[in-house]
């Protein structure tokens, strides 16, 4: 996707945050990891460097080739499988599952939690990334109904216990959103007469305003 060109990860996540979340999933030796809605699998590749066997599943055919190129460049191609498919239709098992911003594949957060829980063994771990309603900031979306506290309670209702809680900070959101729009702006400058120019400009304007 054009707007992702300048992003390291397809989520508002700093390098330090990624390291913290990966550490929270330990131990990772000889475990099977699946990333459901992996995008271009940046977090999955970083996690792979901690030695597990990994699988990434994503519906889009635009992001996965970037993940494969990155895996090849980092010498990880033989240890990761990136497959196009519907994350909501995953029927395998794993020791560690990752779902960051992809619960819509199951129809919502509760549905995702209820679908993934039976596919993890006792002691298995889930790294869940979700938006939440936050009245103290601008990070609000009309489609987001749960507060952070309600989100935590929901995970417990669905059979999980929380090992670690982290929220993306303002600096991470600033970096993510500005680079998202910035990639579009660079394309507009480089392609002033290209087909779709007006549509890309409208997308950048709408996203920045929101």
Image: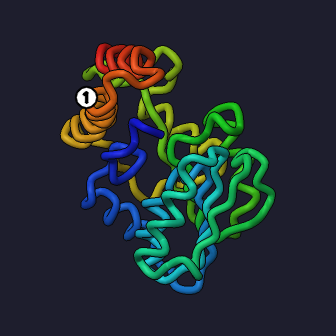
- Say which of 108 and 205 sits in front: 205
- Say which of 121 and 15 sits in front: 15
Q: Residues within 10 Å of mark 1 (few under 14, many from 20)?
A: few
Q: Residue at x 27, y 53 (%)?
A: 14
Q: Is residue 126 visible?
A: yes
Q: Residue furthest left?
A: 171
Q: How many marks?
A: 1
State which quadrant residue 167 falls in.
top left
Q: Relative to 102, is 194 on the left or the right?
A: left
Find residue 9 and report its horizontal and vertical position in percent: 38, 51
Q: Relative to 148, is 101 on the left or the right?
A: right
Find residue 188 and report its horizontal and vertical position in percent: 31, 27
Q: Residue at x 25, y 28 (%)?
A: 189
Q: Is residue 94 above or below residue 59?
A: below
Find residue 69 and report its horizontal and vertical position in percent: 48, 66
Q: Residue at x 34, y 60 (%)?
A: 18
Q: Relative to 33, is 197 on the left or the right?
A: left
| Secondary structure beneath label 1 | helix
State which quadrant residue 77 falls in.
bottom right
Find residue 30 and report its horizontal and vertical position in percent: 58, 85
Q: Is residue 207 above or below residue 32?
A: above
Q: Residue at x 37, y 70 (%)?
A: 23
Quarter that holds the C terminus: top left
Q: Which residue is mark 1?
A: 189
Q: Is residue 25 visible?
A: no
- Say which of 50 and 127 sits in front: 50
The colour scheme applied to this rendered structure is rainbow
Q: Is residue 97 above or below residue 180?
A: below
State which quadrant residue 34 falls in.
bottom right
């Amino acid at each position: 996707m054009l707007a992702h060109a300048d992003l390291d990860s397809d989520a508002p996540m700093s390098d330090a945050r990624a390291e913290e979340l990966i550490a929270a999933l330990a131990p990772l030796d000889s475990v099977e990891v699946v990333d459901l809605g992996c995008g271009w699998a940046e977090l999955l590749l970083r996690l792979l460097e901690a030695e597990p066997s990994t699988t990434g599943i994503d519906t889009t055919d635009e992001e996965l080739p970037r993940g494969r190129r990155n895996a090849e460049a980092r010498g990880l191609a033989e240890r990761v499988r990136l497959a196009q498919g519907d994350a909501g239709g995953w029927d395998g098992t794993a020791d560690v599952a990752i779902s960051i911003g992809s619960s819509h594949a199951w129809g919502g957060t509760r549905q995702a939690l209820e679908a993934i829980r039976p596919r993890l063994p006792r002691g298995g771990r889930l790294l869940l990334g979700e938006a939440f309603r936050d009245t103290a900031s601008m990070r609000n979306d009309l489609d987001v109904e749960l507060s952070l506290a309600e989100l935590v309670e929901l995970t417990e209702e669905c059979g999980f216990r929380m090992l670690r809680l982290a929220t993306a900070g303002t600096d991470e959101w600033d970096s993510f959103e500005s680079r998202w729009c910035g990639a579009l702006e660079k394309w507009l400058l480089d392609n002033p007469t290209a087909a779709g120019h007006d549509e890309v400009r409208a997308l950048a304007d709408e996203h920045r305003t929101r």
